[in-house]
C-alpha cells in the first residue's frame, strides 16, 4: 500500500497542469509534536504533497508507463504556515518533459494566500542511470495512486480536462 | 539581435547559479561542472531544461552532454581509457569542447572535467548563430 498524502484532484489537464487539494487535520499525529502548542504542517510534507501532485501529472503524461522518481527539489520557498483545519491547494505545472525526465513548477495556496513555491525534477528511471535495470512492474504508480484520478482522467489516458466544482 | 558572448556568459552563469546553488563568482569559464560546481547527473538534465528556456532553443539529448552514452559503450572505452575510436566519436559529438588535454591522457574518470562552463557558452553560441 502506497502512502497517499493528497486528498483529491480537482483539475487535471493531461501533460500540462493539475490541481489537487489536501485537508490538514489535528488528527495527524505529527502535528502534536510539530510543534507542541503550535501545530503547523511540516514544510517537508508540503514538498511531499507537491511531489505527489506533480509526479502523478508527469506519470499520466506518459500514460503511467514510466517509473517516475523525484530526482531534485529545484526550489522550495515557504511564505506562510499551514494549520489544522486548513485546506491547501496544490497547483502543479509541467515546464519541460522529455523521454528521460521532467521539470515541474508548483504553488501551494490556502484561501488565495500563497503558502509555498515548489519546483521539482523527476527522472524516468528506466531511461537513465546508464541502463541499470529495475523491476518490470511499475512500482511507482500502483492502482491506489491511479484511483485518485478516477472521474478526472479516463483509463485510456483521455485528454479531455474535466473540472469538479470546488 | 544576436547576443554577445558576454551576454551569453551572464545568462549561463545565472542558469548555473540557480540550478546548482553556487555563487556567481564560482561560475568562471574554466570551472568544471562536476569537479568545481558539484553537478550530479540529474543536474545536467536540469541545466539543459533551463538553457532551453533561457535561450529559447531546443537541445537534443546527447548533444550538449554526450559522455554518458560513450562511457557505456565497450567499443569506446577500454581499461578505463577512451579508445581512439571513442576519441574520434567524442570529437565529432562535442565540437564546442576543448579536448586537447584529455587526448593526451584519456582517462574516463577525467571525462567529467571536460564539461566546463566555457563549453556550455560555446555550445549556446553555436546554437544561436545557427538559428
Image (tube, rainbow, N blue to C red):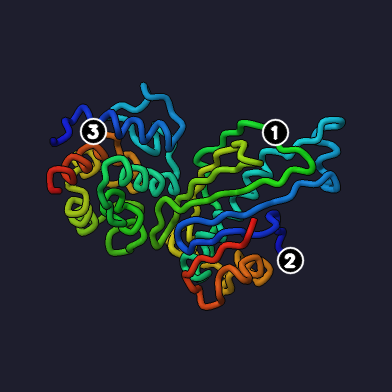
User: In which quarter of the view is residue B115 placed?
Assistant: top left
Q: Chain of mark 2?
A: A
The residue under label 3 is B8
Residue A161: image x %, image y %? 50, 65
User: In which quarter of the view is residue A97 placed?
Assistant: bottom left
Q: Quadrant of the N terminus of chain B?
A: top left
Whether residue B97 appears in this view of the structure is no
Q: Chain of mark 3?
A: B
Residue A8: image x %, image y %? 67, 59
Q: Marks 3 and 1: in contact by CB < 8 Å?
A: no
Find residue A81 and name its label.
Answer: 1
B73 is higher (above) or lower (below) than B128: below
Q: Chain of mark 1?
A: A
Q: Find the distance from the CA under tag 3 to the CA under tag 2.
A: 49 Å
The residue under label 2 is A1
Under tag 3, what secondary structure? helix
Find residue A7 and name its label.
Answer: none
Amino acid at each position: 500500500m502506497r502512502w497517499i498524502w493528497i486528498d483529491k484532484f480537482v483539475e487535471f489537464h493531461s501533460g500540462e497542469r493539475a490541481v489537487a487539494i489536501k485537508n490538514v487535520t489535528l488528527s495527524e499525529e505529527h502535528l502534536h509534536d510539530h510543534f507542541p502548542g503550535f501545530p503547523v504542517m511540516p514544510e517537508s510534507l508540503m514538498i511531499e504533497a507537491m511531489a505527489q501532485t506533480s509526479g502523478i501529472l508527469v506519470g499520466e503524461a506518459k500514460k503511467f508507463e514510466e517509473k517516475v522518481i523525484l530526482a531534485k527539489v529545484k526550489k522550495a520557498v515557504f511564505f506562510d504556515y499551514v494549520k489544522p483545519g486548513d485546506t491547501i491547494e496544490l497547483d502543479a505545472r509541467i515546464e519541460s518533459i522529455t523521454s528521460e525526465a521532467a521539470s515541474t513548477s508548483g504553488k501551494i495556496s490556502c484561501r488565495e494566500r500563497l503558502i509555498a513555491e515548489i519546483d521539482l525534477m523527476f527522472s524516468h528511471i528506466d531511461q537513465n542511470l546508464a541502463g541499470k535495470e529495475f523491476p518490470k512492474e511499475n512500482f511507482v504508480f500502483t492502482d491506489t495512486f491511479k484511483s485518485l484520478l478516477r472521474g478526472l482522467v479516463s483509463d485510456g489516458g483521455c485528454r479531455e480536462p474535466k473540472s469538479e466544482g470546488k | 539581435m544576436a547576443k554577445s558572448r558576454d551576454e551569453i556568459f551572464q545568462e549561463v552563469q545565472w542558469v548555473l547559479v540557480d540550478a546548482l546553488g553556487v555563487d556567481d563568482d564560482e561560475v568562471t569559464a574554466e570551472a568544471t561542472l562536476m569537479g568545481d560546481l558539484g553537478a550530479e547527473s540529474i543536474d545536467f538534465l536540469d541545466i539543459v531544461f533551463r538553457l532551453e528556456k533561457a535561450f529559447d532553443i531546443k537541445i537534443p539529448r546527447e548533444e550538449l552532454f554526450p559522455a554518458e552514452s560513450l562511457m557505456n559503450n565497450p567499443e569506446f572505452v577500454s581499461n578505463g581509457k577512451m579508445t581512439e575510436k571513442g576519441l574520434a566519436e567524442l570529437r565529432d559529438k562535442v565540437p564546442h569542447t576543448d579536448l586537447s588535454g584529455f587526448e593526451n591522457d584519456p582517462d574516463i574518470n577525467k571525462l567529467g572535467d571536460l564539461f566546463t562552463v566555457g563549453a556550455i557558452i560555446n555550445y549556446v553560441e553555436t546554437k544561436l548563430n545557427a538559428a
